[in-house]
Image (cartoon, grey):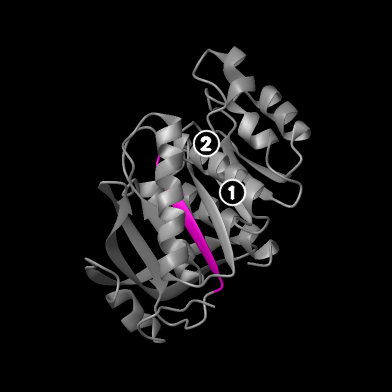
Amino acid sequence: MLNCACTSSLGKAVMTLPNARRRSFVVMQCLVSEKKHLVMDRFDEVTVKVPFGTKQLEAAVCVPSSVKDIHTAVILTHGAGGDMNFKQLVSLAHALASSGFLCLRFTCKGLNLGYRVKAYHAVWDYLKQKFTIKHIFVGGRSMGCRAAAALARQLSDETADAVQGVICLAFPLHPPGQTHTHRQRSEDLKGLPENMSVLFVSGTEDNMCERVLFDGIVTEMRAQAEVFWLKGGSHGLSVKGRSEESVLDEVNLKVITWLSKQGA
């Protein structure tokens, strides 16, 4: 259940977050299943600042305005470039909120992985302080999901149920043309515990994730991993010949379906 110390009303709760600017959206989302159907849902988004040492991290919290009891939250962050308003993250955050999940996405410009993990930890702490959530999933795209996996490994060493799973969008197994670095970048993945669930969404044409190498890493993982290969997808998860929106809808649906299978 989602609770806020100041009020039991979800709509009012988001207003109590510090420095929040409330925006309401009516989202028209097409989800592809056996038949295409249109889902119209309403959610609220607030921008907040998360304390991080002497600094503050820009973040946005999306909550479904029509759901009072929220049991699951997802934290997302961007890759080495961009910020929390990267279209892929915004689209997924809105889809999650439209499906009954709380989603907190944030910006961290640092390119050092250790720094990104510390920032991610601060955001996780912030979420825990502001809301009572039964399940927390961490994730991101590219370098952001590397930081998420590293945090999940760190937290699992401290508390068994700190994180229920990791969502990795375009995991960067190696720099382009440098497949020999894949062992170093996969250490945190192999360190995740058996009770952790991990979803990978990667493109078959991703030049930072050689498929044979990646499939080998997955077999070495103790965690329960599921891999969705986006046919023709690049590292940016774009597909030649397909509209950006259709790809976003497919990826969003996969993430939401996977979360539902985790009992979230």
Q: Residues within 10 Å of mark 2 (few under 14, many from 20)?
A: many
Q: Amino acid at mark 2?
A: Arg
- Residue at image coords 41%, 86%: 8
Vertical relation: 86 (above or below) 207: below
Q: Nearer the viewer, mark 2 or mark 1?
A: 1
Q: Position of residue 184 (x, y in %)?
A: 60, 22
Residue 92 appears in view: no
Q: Secondary structure at mark 1?
A: helix
Looking at marks 2 and 1 on the same chain, the residue that comes earlier in the sequence is marked by: 2
Q: Amino acid at mark 1?
A: Leu
Q: Which mark is residue 146?
A: 2
- Residue at image coords 28%, 61%: 48
Q: Quadrant of the N terminus?
A: bottom right
Q: Secondary structure at mark 2?
A: helix
Vertical relation: 43 (above or below) 188: below
Q: Position of residue 261 (x, y in %)?
A: 69, 62
Q: Which mark is residue 253?
A: none
- Number of numbered callouts drawn: 2
The residue where tag 1 is placed is 155
The CA span between labels 2 and 1 is: 14 Å
Q: Main secondary structure of the magenta part?
A: strand
Q: Answer whether labels 2 and 1 touch (C-beta < 8 Å).
A: no
Q: Position of residue 221 (x, y in %)?
A: 74, 36
Question: Does 43 lie within the magenta span?
Answer: no
Q: Magenta residues, as a range? A: 71-79
Q: Quadrant of the C terminus?
A: bottom right
Question: As drawn, which residue projects farthest toward the bottom?
Answer: 8
Does residue 192 appear left or right of residue 78 in this picture?
right
Q: Nearer the viewer, residue 1 or 241?
A: 1
Q: Position of residue 213 (x, y in %)?
A: 68, 23
Q: Nearer the viewer, residue 57 or 106?
A: 57
